[in-house]
Image (cartoon, rainbow, N blue to C red):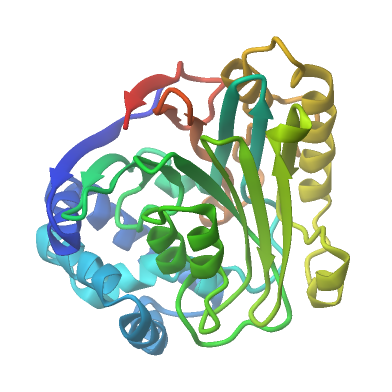
């Protein structure tokens, strides 16, 4: 089955971008607030009102570092008829709910070489968001254009930009989380970065609240992977100048120097990573179409129920069910995004140009 999504194209400053999303996805944002009003007690042992209070120091820290991104949140609230703090609860979803050891989250991969540069990402999150995606194409006053699909009410965290950079992210679970700039805010900021070096700087900002994995590539065929915890980070860099190179990541720390911060014991994450590596080793070869390879990996079910293409577990309570809510493959040489809402096994990818 295919899943609906809202398409938004906007040119303007950050507040205008947020307002356009809020106006176009007003119904979906209201549904997201309603979902979390019921689900947060299970997911975070908080009422929604308690969560609105809990996120305030995070947003104030974000305002210190990225006031323009907070203006985007304010625009979304204005456009959707909600409050900043309701939108902030969605923005701080990782900070509020990703403190234990969940079953799964995202899978990201990158393949460069043979004149191609491709990044792919399955956005695995709570199933309540699968029919509330927004396909956003935004152009900012400085000329930056980015294209992303994300659930309504959330800041875009993954995507491709006119600077020839694309990136995905994977939630990580460390023992040094703290009040700081929310991960989604840093990811949204990174979408505007003009170089991989700037992506690194923004994702590793010293005032970040928590850890994440950030896997990016540029049209020059360079791959950058950055693992962060709340207080530490580790980098891996690959280049197609060395031939065809690929990398994959899920939701466990891989860098030995960050192993001491790991709190996840997720077998799901390990199985997805092992399967992605197996497929990339078999398929990401010179002469292959790397967009097709990435899409094939992201559709894979071989390790079900711990599969790369995720589907909700009907045995779990509704608010705890996770699935692939969106799938994106970014072709950096062509400047295109291949995208679908929901699990990619259920829909054809649409193609959107930057």
Picture quadrant where residue 89 is located: bottom left
Q: Is residue 203 left or right of residue 352?
A: right
Q: Position of residue 87 (x, y in %)?
A: 29, 68
Rendered position, 126 above or below 327: below
The residue that appears at 50% across and 33% down in the rendered structure is: 327
Vertical position of residue 75 compared to residue 251: above or below: below
- Residue 249 seen in the figure: no
Q: Nearer the viewer, residue 56 or 71?
A: 71
Q: Residue at x 70, y 24 (%)?
A: 300
Q: Is residue 242 left or right of residue 213?
A: right
Q: Give the side of residue 174 with respect to residue 193, left or right.
A: right
Residue drawn at x 47%, y 70% is: 40
x and y percent of residue 203 in the render? 53, 66
Q: Which of the 4 image quarters holds residue 242? A: top right
The percent coordinates of residue 297 (x first, y second) are 68, 25
Q: Is residue 77 visible?
A: yes
């Amino acid at each position: 089955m295919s899943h609906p999504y809202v398409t938004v194209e906007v040119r303007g400053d950050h507040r205008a971008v947020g307002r356009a999303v809020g106006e176009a996805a007003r119904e979906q944002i209201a549904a997201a607030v309603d979902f979390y009003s019921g689900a947060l007690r299970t997911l975070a042992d908080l009422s929604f009102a308690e969560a609105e209070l809990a996120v305030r120091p995070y947003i104030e820290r974000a305002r210190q570092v990225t006031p323009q991104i907070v203006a985007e949140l304010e625009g979304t609230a204005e456009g959707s008829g909600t409050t900043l703090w309701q939108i902030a609860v969605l923005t701080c979803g990782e900070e509020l709910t990703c403190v234990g050891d969940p079953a799964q989250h995202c899978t990201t991969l990158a393949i460069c070489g043979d004149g191609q540069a491709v990044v792919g990402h399955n956005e695995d999150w709570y199933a309540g968001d699968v029919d509330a995606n927004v396909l956003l194409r935004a152009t900012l006053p400085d000329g930056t254009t980015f294209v992303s699909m994300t659930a309504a009410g959330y800041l875009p965290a993954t995507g491709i930009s006119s600077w020839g950079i694309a990136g995905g992210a994977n939630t990580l679970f460390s023992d040094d989380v703290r009040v700081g700039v929310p991960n989604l805010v840093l990811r949204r900021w990174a979408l505007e970065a003009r170089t991989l070096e700037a992506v690194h700087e923004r994702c590793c900002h010293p005032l970040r609240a928590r850890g994440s994995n950030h896997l990016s590539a540029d049209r020059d065929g360079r791959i950058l992977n950055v693992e962060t915890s709340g207080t530490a980070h580790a980098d891996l860099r690959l280049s197609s100048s060395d031939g065809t190179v690929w990398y994959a990541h899920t939701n466990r720390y891989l860098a030995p120097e960050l192993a001491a911060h790991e709190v996840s014991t997720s077998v799901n994450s390990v199985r997805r990573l092992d399967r992605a590596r197996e497929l990339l080793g078999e398929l990401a070869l010179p002469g292959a179409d790397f967009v097709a390879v990435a899409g094939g990996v992201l559709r894979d079910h071989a390790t079900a129920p711990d599969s790369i293409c995720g589907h909700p577990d009907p045995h779990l309570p509704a608010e705890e069910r996770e699935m692939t809510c969106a799938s994106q493959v970014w072709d950096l040489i062509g400047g295109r995004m291949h995208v679908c809402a929901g699990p990619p096994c259920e829909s054809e990818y649409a193609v959107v140009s930057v």
